[in-house]
Amino acid sequence: MKREWRRMPPLVSGGGGAGAIVANVLALLFVAGLLPLVMGVAFLEPGPLIAFAALSVFFVASIVTGCFAGEAARRDLRELSAAGASDGAILLGKAGAAGLRGWTLGMAVVEVGVIMVNLANWQGHALFPDRAVSGKAIALSLAASLLVALAGALISLRAPSARLANRNLKIAIVLAILVSTDAVWFYPGDLLKVANLAWIVLGLLVIGAAISFRSLRKQVLAATVTGS
């Protein structure tokens, strides 16, 4: 994981080159700077804070595909296997590094947002979100990032290029968001008021990550053996 972390570029491009990096930086400035300014103290409420923390999954999507998709990534998988690394260690190292890097960037967006809210609404004391809300946002963001990293590894191992893998993964993320939104709207009652909803979702994310990891080990093994 440490090796993969050092190999990752400081800015994510999603396989799109310098133009994609510039576009991502501009999008970050808009999301982390302008939106919190417009929202004001509402940014610190549970819904917006968790939603912004969940943006980490898109950072993960732009990072993880480069770790598994494409000839260079496949060659690296074969070299790691030849060096004696197990399929599980390779998967955890690469996907784990991508998940943690994306989660770190997502948390940075939230931190910048909190700073912008304080700059725009300074009243002699700092404004912070509730500690319980912050804990839920951090935990959900981390679990979702690791799940997307593993799902991205699965998609990337089956894609011919990092760019195509990145596109497919982001489509899958958007579809998952749409399905989740529909579940909220069509649930018979107020789903958002279900007791311990955040921890229920966290448990589902962890279970999903465990299932993904179990099914991915064979895919990684096949990639290191055949190079396909």
Image (cartoon, helix red, strand yellow):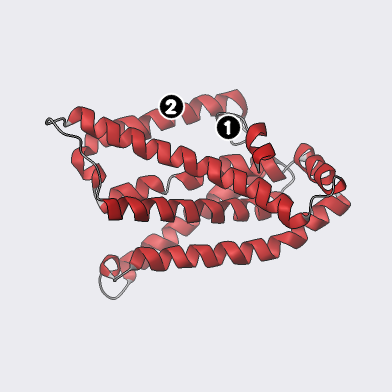
The residue under the point 61% across, 55% down is 151
Tell me, yes or no, if residue 36 can be seen here: yes
Q: How far apart are marks 1 and 2 (CA)?
A: 12 Å
Amino acid at circle 1: Ser
Name the spot of residue 225 as percent of width and height, x first.
Answer: 87, 53
**Up-down relation of residue 221 to residue 23 (above or below):** below
Q: How crowded is mark 2: few (under 14 residues within 10 Å), some or many (20 or more)?
A: few
Q: Residues within 10 Å of mark 1 (few under 14, many from 20)?
A: many
- The earlier-in-sequence mark between 1 and 2 is 1
- The local secondary structure at tag 1 comes to loop
Q: Is 53 or 183 nearer to us in this picture?
A: 53
Name the spot of residue 74 as percent of width and height, x first.
Answer: 79, 44
Tell me, yes or no, if residue 166 can be seen here: no
Name the spot of residue 121 as percent of width and height, x first.
Answer: 16, 32
The residue under the point 42% across, 56% down is 140
Q: Residue furthest left?
A: 123
The residue under the point 87% across, 46% down is 82
Name the spot of residue 55 as percent of width and height, x first.
Answer: 43, 45
Relative side of 169 to 222, left or right? left
Which residue bears the numbered disc 1?
13
Relative side of 91 to 201, left or right? right
**Up-down relation of residue 149 to residue 218 (above or below):** above
Occupied quadrant, residue 166: top right
In the image, which disc is placed on residue 26? 2
**Where, quadrant-wise, is the N terminus in this rendering?**
top right
Q: Is 127 or 54 nearer to us in this picture?
A: 127
Query: Marks 2 and 1: in contact by CB < 8 Å?
Result: no
Relative side of 134 to 152, left or right? left
Q: Residue furthest bottom?
A: 188
